[in-house]
């Protein structure tokens, strides 16, 4: 009896530990409190500040553009790398997989600092060109795209590509019409992960971004050191908006996955 009562408590405690701080922050974003601790009245002023302050709007738009732009490049490179590795000899494929693990395991601060030294100091590329920042985020995200695509390639029937070539298709056409449709779910997952990593990154952006450019992460860190209370509380609203969007995206993806699975089961019947 005790086991039946205690067993559900563990996942409940984990969920509380993970989500209680976010829920509290979301609650305070709808108040006029200037710090966590006392609620005087409820208001939407933080959300009004968030969407009417030009500085905040520009920072959000710049972060989104950087995330999607770098994610597109990372998805292209990661997908091509995964396909090339999959169709290479075993020794070459193992070597590529090993090298791909290094950026994944490596600390972001090391990656950011290394890219800054290589591009800015060694090659003399100015940080004002945004090139180091984009390259840094692509370097961060591409290995994760590779890891998302490789399992889909291994699940695919490898003979389909050779069959398409035997039937007269060019390698490019066989790739686009045979291989890509088989691994599209892995590509989409890799792209989504690349966007998330770019939005979340702080260290690489800190070392490689221009002085006048801020992502959400770097802006939040700098804002917490300042004395502008209205900006700080508006960031509570920003955190809440991001959290709600993430919940909606996860729900849509799960519902879509369940629908596809039901259609497959229905087709088998």
Image (cartoon, rainbow, N blue to C red):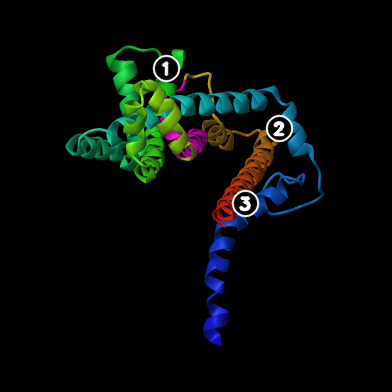
How far separated are the C-alphas under marks 3 and 1? Answer: 34 Å
Quarter placement of the N terminus: bottom right
Task: Give x and y (percent) for residue 211.
Answer: 49, 19
Q: Earlier in the sequence, mark 3 or mark 2?
A: 3
Q: Nearer the viewer, residue 215 or 262?
A: 262
Tell whether position 196 is magenta: yes
Pointers 3 and 2 in contact (C-beta within 8 Å): no
Q: Which residues are magenta?
A: 186-209
Q: Main secondary structure of the magenta part?
A: helix
Q: Is residue 261 above or below residue 65?
A: below
For image coordinates 34% across by 23% down, the residue present is: 171
- The image quarter containing residue 60 is top right
Outermost residue to the front: 167
How far separated are the C-alphas under marks 3 and 2? Answer: 18 Å
| Residue bearing mark 1 | 131
Q: Earlier in the sequence, mark 1 or mark 2?
A: 2
| Residue bearing mark 2 | 50
- The image quarter containing residue 180 is top left
Numbered disc in front, either 3 or 1: 1
Q: Nearer the viewer, residue 155 or 127?
A: 155
């Amino acid at each position: 009896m005790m086991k039946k009562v205690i067993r559900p408590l563990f996942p409940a405690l984990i969920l509380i530990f993970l989500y209680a701080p976010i829920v509290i922050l979301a609650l305070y974003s709808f108040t006029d409190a200037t710090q966590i601790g006392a609620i005087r009245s409820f208001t939407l002023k933080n959300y009004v500040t968030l969407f009417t302050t030009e500085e905040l709007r520009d920072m959000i738009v710049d972060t989104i553009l950087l995330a999607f732009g770098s994610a597109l490049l990372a998805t292209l490179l990661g997908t091509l790398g995964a396909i090339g590795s999959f169709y290479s000899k075993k020794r070459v494929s193992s070597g590529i997989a090993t090298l791909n693990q290094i950026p994944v395991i490596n600390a972001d601060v090391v990656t950011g600092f290394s890219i800054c030294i290589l591009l800015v100091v060694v090659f003399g590329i100015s940080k004002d060109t945004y090139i180091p920042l984009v390259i840094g985020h692509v370097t961060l995200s591409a290995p994760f795209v590779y890891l998302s695509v490789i399992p889909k390639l291994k699940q695919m029937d490898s003979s389909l590509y050779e069959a398409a070539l035997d039937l007269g298709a060019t390698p490019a056409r066989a790739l686009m019409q045979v291989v890509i449709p088989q691994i599209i779910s892995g590509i989409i997952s890799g792209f989504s992960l690349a966007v998330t990593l770019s939005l979340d990154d702080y260290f690489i952006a800190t070392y490689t971004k221009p002085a006048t450019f801020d992502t959400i992460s770097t802006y939040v860190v700098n804002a917490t050191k300042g004395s502008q209370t209205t900006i700080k509380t508006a960031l509570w609203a920003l955190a809440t908006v991001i959290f709600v969007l993430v919940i909606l995206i996860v729900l849509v993806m799960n519902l879509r996955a369940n629908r596809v699975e039901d259609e497959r089961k229905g087709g088998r019947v």
